Image: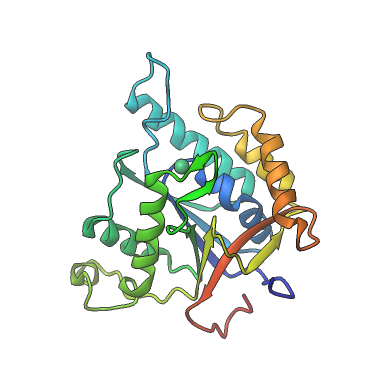
């Protein structure tokens, strides 16, 4: 069942994704809504997205530059304030301890109340889309870095030496979950979501706007919401500061 009333914006949120443009599909409407309410949003993009081209003239190096600029332009539409481009190679993502430590460092640096990422358990969405392996790894690593690694002092002690103190993320929100338990009404930000998606011309045709519209309508339909994004939410810590 959906939460009622809808959770309000947290003070801060971190979105962990695999590729530049993932966040626009998954959470753009929610992020824009929260940013308007003063939430400090950080995007963490793990890979460079440097494989996303069929153009024989394109190089991975040039594509990396293009996609980082596209991501910043899309985030600017939504009110995203901070960006972390981790620079891992696209398409090769693996759940290593090195990657988990690197994501943990960013969680401790930005200290988000809410972390949003992929549901790593959802491999098959429909009969025409198999989830990208980088998405599964990104979700898995983000979850593990959030709990328990960012919280525990004795894990990756080198982070302490570098000044990154433990941090308890209050809530995890998973996008693409088979069993969502929170729906965010994005009616007031669906146009910003479309505008942000259009900031990724190296990847997306203008028809992406119709796709985003239809998807948000379909997501909200059963809840009686005109346009929605859905999440599976986990409350790890009750937060006295925020009513998230
Ligand atoms: Zn992706």
Q: Residue at x 72, y 43 (%)?
A: 214
Indicate the position of residue 236 as horizontal and vertical percent values.
Answer: 47, 79
Indicate the position of residue 154 as horizontal and vertical percent values.
Answer: 21, 78
Question: Does 214 sit left or right of 150 as displayed?
Answer: right
Viewer-closest of 145 and 230: 230
Say above or below: 240 vs 111.
Answer: below
Can the viewer see residue 84? no
Viewer-closest of 52 and 167: 52
Q: Quadrant of the C terminus?
A: bottom right
Can the viewer see residue 61? yes
Q: Residue at x 72, y 50 (%)?
A: 218
Viewer-closest of 197 and 133: 133
Question: Does 76 sit left or right of 83 as displayed?
Answer: right
Question: Does 108 sit left or right of 122 as displayed?
Answer: left
Q: Outermost residue, top direction?
A: 57
Indicate the position of residue 79 as horizontal and vertical percent values.
Answer: 61, 51
Viewer-closest of 76 and 144: 144
Q: Outermost residue, front direction?
A: 127
Q: Quadrant of the N terminus?
A: bottom right
Q: Residue at x 53, y 53 (%)?
A: 81
Q: Residue at x 60, y 78 (%)?
A: 242
Label tally = 0
Say above or below: 14 vs 192.
Answer: below
Indicate the position of residue 41 as horizontal and vertical percent values.
Answer: 54, 58
Question: Does 109 sit left or right of 77 as displayed?
Answer: left
Colour scheme of the rendered structure = rainbow
């Amino acid at each position: 069942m959906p939460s009622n009333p809808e959770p309000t914006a947290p003070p801060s949120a971190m979105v962990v994704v695999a590729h530049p443009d993932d966040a626009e599909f998954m959470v753009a409407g929610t992020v824009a809504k929260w940013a308007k309410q003063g939430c400090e949003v950080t995007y963490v993009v793990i890979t460079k997205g440097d494989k996303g081209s069929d153009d024989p003239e394109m190089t991975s190096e040039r594509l990396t530059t293009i996609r980082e600029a596209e991501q910043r332009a899309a985030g600017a539409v939504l009110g995203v304030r901070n960006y972390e481009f981790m620079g891992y190679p696209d398409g090769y993502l693996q759940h290593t301890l090195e990657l988990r430590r690197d994501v943990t460092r960013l969680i401790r640096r930005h200290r988000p109340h809410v972390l949003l990422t992929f549901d790593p358990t959802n491999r098959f969405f429909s009969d025409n889309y198999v989830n990208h392996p980088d998405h599964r790894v990104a979700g898995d690593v983000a979850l593990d870095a959030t709990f328990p690694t960012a919280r525990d002092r004795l894990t990756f002690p080198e982070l302490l030496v570098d000044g990154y103190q433990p941090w308890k993320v209050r809530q995890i929100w998973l996008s693409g979950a088979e069993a969502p338990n929170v729906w965010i009404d994005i009616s007031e930000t669906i146009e910003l979501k479309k505008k942000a998606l259009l900031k990724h011309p190296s990847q997306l045709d203008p028809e992406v706007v119709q796709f985003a519209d239809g998807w948000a309508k379909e997501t909200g339909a059963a809840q009686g919401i005109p346009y929605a994004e859905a999440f599976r939410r986990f409350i790890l810590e009750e937060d006295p500061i925020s009513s998230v």
